[in-house]
Amino acid sequence: QIQSGLRFDYRNINSAEYLEDNIVLFPTLNENYKSLNYALGAVYSMNKINLRANFSSGFRSPNTSELLSNGVHHGTNRFLVGNSTLENEQATQIDFSLDYNNEHLNFSVNPFFNSIQNYIFLTPTGSMIDDAPVFDYRQNNAILYGGELAFHYHPHLIHWLHLESNISTVMAQNDEGEALPLIPATRINSTVKAILDQKGVFQITDIFINHIYKFDQNRIGAFETTTPSYHLLNAGINFKINAKSFPIECSTGIKNLLNEKYIDHLSRLKSMDILNQGRNFYIQARINLQRSMKK
């Protein structure tokens, strides 16, 4: 199977000048952003294997925050400085995937390579304004590459047991080989799940334990700080209440079961040394109103 396509985008941003005490805080802006993009993909299937390949271009125009920011973002305690001269991001990407599926095993590998002209990124500058670290929106040519490897296995003799795991990574650098800031760390996400076949009004559908491991992020941009590795352990139960009028799907569990103290590399509160959430409990209920109304 082969698929291709073309797409044209056009965007206009028109913003008036804003003065405060005769100082220009936000300049006049009247810019047009447009781009013609393409995609070409192919899929080849043989027995239990699917091969996919895609070659495409992409486009993103800068948004008003990237163009016109000039002040402290109090949700992150960052002083953001926009850049009204930013141009379109224009990307060219090639990616592949190999999927193997049989009755008990699903396996996939998906590498990619992306070259981006005029990549827009937010970076710390090492300076302070109004007691807040200054972050600038900047632009440079960039290369991003990486991929994902995943499998899902449920043994024939223990059909209710499901083992799932995936590892994902991305590397990013400018055209001079320097690391770009605010790139997520490599992650392994693994789950052990027991799927139960219960009957009755109250029905437990599955029980799971999930483990997430984030590697050290030492490949950082200028004025950016490294982030150590950490583990997160989560557990939960999903169940149904099969009421005749209002069937309810519920889930409950614990996130960060071991109360790990950590700060995610992409946390907007990292500069303030504010930790991510510790051990926390949740419960969720969903009522299928569509099904109820049909009855």
Image (tube, grey):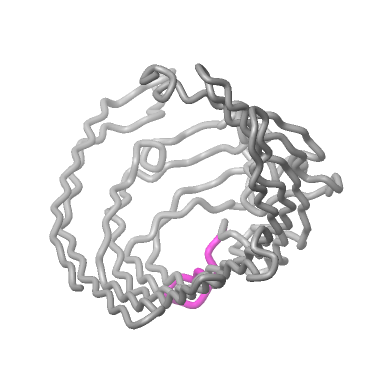
The foreground one among 219 and 291 is 291
Q: Image height check: is 90 above or below 15?
A: below
Q: Image height check: is 251 above or below 94?
A: above
Residue 285 point in image, percent of width and height: 61, 26
The foreground one among 246 and 49 is 246
Residue 211 point in image, percent of width and height: 73, 57
Q: Which residues are magenta?
A: 172-181
Q: Quadrant of residue 169?
A: bottom right
- Magenta stretch contains residue 231: no
Residue 252 point in image, percent of width and height: 71, 34
The foreground one among 26 and 271 is 271
- Kindly identify the residue that appears in the image at 80 percent across and 40 percent down: 278
- Kindly identify the residue that appears in the image at 71 percent across and 47 percent down: 207
Q: Image height check: is 8 above or below 54?
A: above
The foreground one among 203 and 120 is 203
Q: Quadrant of residue 3?
A: bottom left
Q: Quadrant of residue 74?
A: top right
Asked if one can make out residue 171 in the rendered structure from this viewpoint, the answer is no
Q: In the shown orientation, is residue 6 left or right of residue 125?
A: left
Q: Seen from this angle, which residue lies furthest right?
A: 258
Q: Quadrant of the N terminus?
A: bottom left
Q: Does the magenta stretch mainly form a helix, a strand or a loop? A: loop
Q: In the shown orientation, is residue 211 left or right of residue 50?
A: right
Asked if one can make out residue 152 in the rendered structure from this viewpoint, the answer is yes
- Kindly identify the residue that appears in the image at 85 percent across and 44 percent down: 259
Q: In the shown orientation, is residue 167 left or right of residue 6?
A: right
Q: Seen from this angle, which residue lies furthest front?
A: 200
- Magenta stretch contains residue 177: yes
Q: In the shown orientation, is residue 131 left or right of residue 262?
A: left
Residue 105 point in image, percent of width and height: 55, 72
